[in-house]
Amino acid sequence: MIKNADPRLVEAWQKIEDARDAYANELKAVQEGCEHLLVAHWKGDGSDPYRICLNCRFEEKGSHWSFNVNHWKAADHTPSLLGTSPERLIFEVGRSEIFKLRVPTYTIQNS
Ligand SMILES: [Zn+2]
């Protein structure tokens, strides 16, 4: 939020915040409606492994024991949405590929 500035700047900044909110709402809706059937898996190479849904880009960090593609537990021990299951196709990718799949996330500012 820009305050006490030229009204054009305040208005332009508000448009940015509104667009971020619209994006955040769409991302949330897409991710909540996705079955996460195509997932990229990075084994972590010594750090925590990562999985990202190729459709909605929902991502999870796995426990350090989850480097094996056939075993997955979320690092924070919450129920996993990207776990290994028969209907889910999981593709192993490298570090540079997994982080290129990430999308920006924003906290909704205006309600
Ligand atoms: Zn998904």
Image (spheres, rainbow, N blue to C red):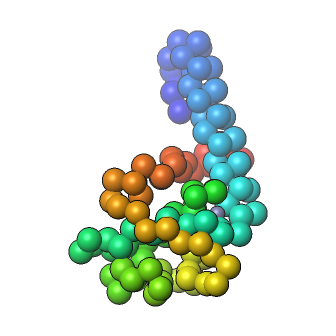
Q: Residue at x 65, y 43 (%)?
A: 23
In front of the other: 3 or 35: 35
Marks counted in the figure total: 0
In front of the other: 51 or 106: 51
Q: Say left or right for 32 vs 95.
A: right
Q: Residue at x 59, y 72 (%)?
A: 89
- Seen as rendered, the residue at the extreme left is 46
Residue 52 seen anywhere in this rendered image of the structure: yes
Residue 96 percent coordinates (x, y)? 34, 53
Does 102 sit above or below residue 75?
Answer: above
Which image quarter has ligand 1?
Answer: bottom right
In front of the other: 101 or 12: 101
Residue 74 percent coordinates (x, y)? 47, 80
Q: In the picture, residue 17 is in which quadrant?
A: top right
Residue 75 seen anywhere in this rendered image of the structure: no
Q: Residue at x 52, y 26 (%)?
A: 3
Residue 29 percent coordinates (x, y)? 73, 56
Q: Say left or right for 28 vs 53.
A: right
Residue 95 percent coordinates (x, y)? 33, 59
Q: Residue at x 46, y 87 (%)?
A: 71
